Structure formats: structure tokens, C-alpha cells
Image (cartoon, helix red, strand yellow):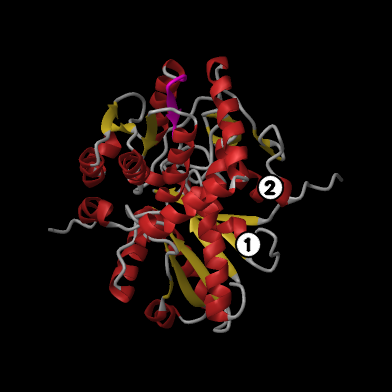
Amino acid sequence: MTKPPSLSSLPDTRGYFGAFGGRFVPETVIPALEELTDTYLVARDDAEFQAELDHLHRTYTGRPTPLTYARRLTEHLGGAQIYLKREDLAHSGAHKINNAIGQALLTRRMNKKRIIAETGAGQHGVATATACALLGLECIVYMGRVDMERQKPNVFRMRLLGAEVRAVDSGSRTLKDAINEAIRDWVTNVETTHYLLGSALGPHPYPLMVRDFQSVIGREARAQFLERVGQLPDVVMACVGGGSNSIGIFHAFRDDQDVRLIGVEAGGRGIDSHEHAARFADQMIARVGTLHGTKSYVMQTEDGQIMETHSISAGLDYPSIGPEHAYLRDIGRAEYTHATDEETLEAFQSLCKLEGIIPALESAHAVVEAIKLAPTLSADQTILINLSGRGDKDLDTVLQALDMEP
């Protein structure tokens, strides 16, 4: 049996994590990807670039974000001690700003003035609009019509920040379709435009680059946990859509074999319903394929058509998953589970009432798994949850789901 490559060596020069990743795109965008790859690899080793990025994170993003001990949730559940990495307190309300500022700086470095982006929950769109406003760049955000309806506050925020939000009415009118439209724009305007992809997916170098920009979460959390608790967490967990917040916190712990890594996908209305976005939970419909420029697990019909997904959280409503997650799952380094819409709403309310924190519905999926796991562990064990975003954007969705009056 061939020994798998070292995690620290991935992706390889072609952008592969084992069998996953690569670059499956029209020839017209290959030069732009080559330029982006070269620019990023130079910037990654450029002390001046890294110093500017670090300065902006400290003085603008609000890093480091704090580590919060969830005392009342811990006491309520019994068992393991629960800690939260508070990306909801980053400027613009989620982890997405880490990657947006990094790629916006690269755009300026490439002497491009126009940025396009896709968004589902709206947080990446808001983060991109924020970074463009900061650096004086033109910003166009593609968003599915369905997501625009359920994320109206974020649409308004993007427009206030100077972005043009373009509604997408094709397909399921959600994140997958927004990415399709963004790629079409990029193919047409590739010489003047940078596509600021928001998750750890897409063609190489995006999975590498987004992971690296988001790995600040894990580096901070690891140092904070060691200082606060005196040891590493027993379990690190995060929600997984495309996978940027989860790979960001997993990365710092990937070589710590005693630390369990758990990603939580969107179980939607239940696996048996096939109305979900749990790529690893439903092997009947999730098979290896290519989508949006990368090879990974993709929810598809028997004849290879991309299936529509469902999640109460717009940011997890995606039929594929980042290639590094596919690799971590296949080698057994990370575990993946799922949470249904109903479970997520319950966890959302629990965190609100017990900790005074209103999480994003995406993040509440990870809280579901903590609620299940904590009572099975001992009181001297610890769970670290990446709380990827805040939930003000989701209040209309929650009120409607719970049939409550505002």
C-alpha cells in the first residue's frame, strides 16, 4: 500500500490533495490562474506583504478574535468543556474577511481594479465589498435570487459598501448558480478582473490560497488554547459548506494526531429525503466528480447532473466540498457528520439563551455536534468550536422557521 503524502506537502505543484483538486477550467482563464498562482506564491514569502496583511488584521479586521469559554452550555450538557473561537466578532461578522482582505491585496499587486465574487449567505459578499471599499476597488457580487430573499440584510450591507449585487435567476438560484455566473463574468473579463472566490474550493491555487488566508484562525486558536487551558483541545469542530472556516481552524491541528477534527455538514430535511447538502453522508448521490474547476465529492444524479441541495443556512447549501476536506476524510484524518435543519434551530436557540451569543445558522450546525458529543466525554476533556459567523443575517429565516413574531 502506498503511503499517503505528508499533509504539510499538500497540495502538490498541480494543486492536488491526493486524488482531489486540480484545475478543470476553460483555457481562457488558465493565464489568469497562472498569474494568480505566481503572484500568491511570491506574496506568501514576501515579508512586506505579510506585514501589511497582519497590520490590517490587527487594526481593521479586529484580530486576534477571542477564545470564549462556554460555561453555561458546558454546565447544561455535562461532560466536556466547550470553548468557542469567536470569528463572529471579526469585522463584517464572519471569518470571510480574512480571505477577502488577503485576495484584495493580491488584486492590487496584480494591478487589477475590478473584483467579482459569489456569495450564498452573503457574508463573503459583505467581506469582499468591505475589502474593496478599503482598497478602492470596483466590486460586483453574484448572488442567487433565493439567497437574496433570505439574506436581505446582507444584500443591503453590500450595496451600502459600494458593491453592485447581481441577482442570479438560473438553476436553483442559490450558491452553485452564483458561482456559475461569476465564472462566466471572469471568462469574459479575465484580463482586468480578479475572481475573489470565497471558499476553499475551485481550481488551483484557490483551495491552497483560501486555506492559507483562513489558517490565521487555527494559529490563533492553537496558541490561545495552549495559553488558556495548558494543552491542546481533544476535539476541534466546525461547519463545512465549501469548507473555508473549517479548513482554516483544522490546518493548525492537522499534525496533532490526538486532536479529533470534526466537520459538520448540512443535513437539511434529513439524509433519507435527499434534501440536504451532506456530501459525505449520502453515498447514493455523492460521488467523485468535478464542479467549478476542482475534483472532489459532488452530489449528482445517476447520469452525472448536479443535484439541487437544501439547507436552512444559505452558506452550506452547496453540492460539493473543498478538495482538501475530501482528502482528509479519505485518509481518515478528519471525521464528517451532519446536522438537520431542526437540530440546527435548536442549537441556535440554545447558544442564544445560554451564552448570550446569536450564531450564524452555519455555525449552529457545529454547535449541534458539540451538544451531541460533550455529554459522552469526561469533564477533563475539551471541545473547540469555530464559531464562524454571527446570526443577525439569519433572524428573518429563524423567525419564519419558528413561526414567531419579530
Given residues 274 and 261, the one toward you in this image is: 261
Extreme-front residue of the structure: 48
Residue 236 as seen in the image, left or right of residue 275: right
> Whole-percent x and y of residue 387?
42, 61
Q: Is residue 371 visible?
A: no
Please tell me whether mark 2 or mark 1 is closer to you in this view. 1
Q: Quadrant of residue 193?
A: top left
> In which quadrant will I find the C terminus?
bottom left
Assess whether residue 337 is covered by the magenta stretch. Answer: no
Residue 10 as seen in the image, left or right of residue 362? right
For mark 1, give the secondary structure: helix
- Residue 253 circle label: 1
Q: Position of residue 69 (x, y in %)?
A: 43, 77
Magenta part of the chain:
190-196
Number of residues whose C-alpha sits closer than 10 Å to that of mark 2, classed few (under 14), some (14–19) or many (20 or more): few
- Mark drawn on residue 330: 2
Q: Residue at left 49%, top 34%?
A: 109
Badge 1: how crowded within 10 Å, few (<14), some, or many (20+)? many
Pick whichever of labels 2 and 1 is earlier in the sequence: 1
Q: Is residue 326 above or below residue 385?
A: above
Amino acid type at mark 2: Asp
Q: Secondary structure at mark 2?
A: helix
Residue 129 percent across, percent down from the top left: 32, 40
Is residue 185 something one can see in this rendering?
yes
- State the residue at coordinates (39%, 33%): 117
Residue 89 pos. (x, y %)? 35, 62
**Quarter of the figure that contains the N terminus:** top right
Residue positioned 73% across, 46% down in the render: 9
